[in-house]
Amino acid sequence: MGSVQRLAKGKYKLTISQGFDEHGKRIRRYKTVDAKGKREAEQLLREFEKELEEETLAKGEAIRFGKFYELWKADYAIPHLEPSTLEIYRIVSKPILHHFRNHQLAAITGMQISQFLNNEKLNGKGSLEKKYNVLKSIFKWAVKWKYIKYNPMEGVKKPRNPQKEMEFYDRDEIREVLEEVKTMERKQQLKVKLAVVGGLRRGEVLAIAEDAVIWETNQIKVFRSVQFSTEGGLRLKRTKTGDSRIVTFPKWLMMELRLHYLEVLHHRAKLGHLWKGWEDTDGRQVTLLFADEYGKPLRPNSITQFWGKFMKRNPQLKRIRFQDLRHSMASLILSEGVNIKILQKRLGHKRANTTLNVYAHITEKDDKRASDVFDNLE
């Protein structure tokens, strides 16, 4: 990106911006030229850009992958990625850096990248798609910033993580879980019930605030999620898809939730000025229904931890993850013949195809039942 500035008659200053260095400082190159007018100065600017482009390509021949990774992180990743995504990228970048750090950036080939990803897969390493996405982003910006001419990722096929078989509870198992959670504190019971009945994610449960509950119609507006990352700390932000959805709950569950909410209000009043509360990323002060004693959000992994302890205390129950309670809800209502579009909205999927792909094991059974209707026609 360049600009032309007139200094005096027949004198112009050319400025080219070349992104940022590894310390986040903007890199600018300058040149003073003689020109009869602005049009000639702009032509000289284009020539200057080409000159610097060739110079950068020459640097690309020598720059190591690890050095360029730091440039990419400072100039692209930190300013433009969500803290939660940045945290994931930071973790999955470790094996990438271990393998490619000392390679010359311009010398890395598509075959070398494919071999790296294939070896990761053969050695049982996970997050293959995320590693691919990190590499794709790095080399895309290497081309954009003129460090390399060709993108080696163009010939690399995106790997697929092995699809794990989904675990979930059936109707009887859900009934048993709801019976066993009665031994927990009310607030812990509610976290489980909101996931089982409403299909809410961990962060969505922890983000429920008083402005999200519609008591009159037994509904909760799901539009925020609690996220935690090393880079960004705790954040109360818009949900994963960026959209809001309304989830209707049984009256009995909303009555339990209201009792808990009244306890939260009583506790807030009792603390007085010691109550801190929290602001969402839009700057709105909120009172969360599930927070620490001062109104600060809980980390999503706090739910994973208490669910793990619950699983250990109840060895008779099938061991599943907390997020599989969401799948249990979906599988149950699908098996009851609820329309896929209704389930899509309840889960917060942007597309019905996502819902169909995730719950194909259920829809296949429904397809078999549909076929059975015609068995008696022969």
Image (spheres, helix red, strand yellow):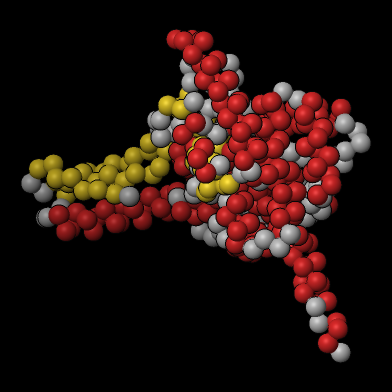
Residue 78 seen in the figure: no
Q: Name the spot of residue 209 as percent of width and height, x first.
A: 51, 31
Up-down relation of residue 351 to residue 63 (above or below): below
Who is closer to the viewer here, 55 or 135? 135
Q: Quadrant of residue 29?
A: top left
Q: Name the spot of residue 93 as percent of width and height, x first.
A: 65, 40
- At horizontal 56% and vertical 26% (from top left) the residue drawn is 261
43 left or right of 106? left
Q: Quadrant of the C terminus?
A: bottom right
- At horizontal 82% and vertical 32% (from top left) the residue drawn is 180
- At horizontal 80% and vertical 71% (from top left) the residue drawn is 369
Residue 218 seen in the figure: yes
Q: Name the spot of residue 302 as percent of width and height, x first.
A: 68, 27
- At horizontal 75% and vertical 53% (from top left) the residue drawn is 332
Residue reaching furthest to the bottom: 378
354 left or right of 210? right
Q: Name the spot of residue 246 as percent of width and height, x first.
A: 53, 47
Residue reaching furthest to the right: 316
Who is closer to the viewer here, 102 or 191? 191
177 left or right of 353? right
Who is closer to the viewer here, 253 or 42? 253
Up-down relation of residue 52 to residue 309 (above or below): below
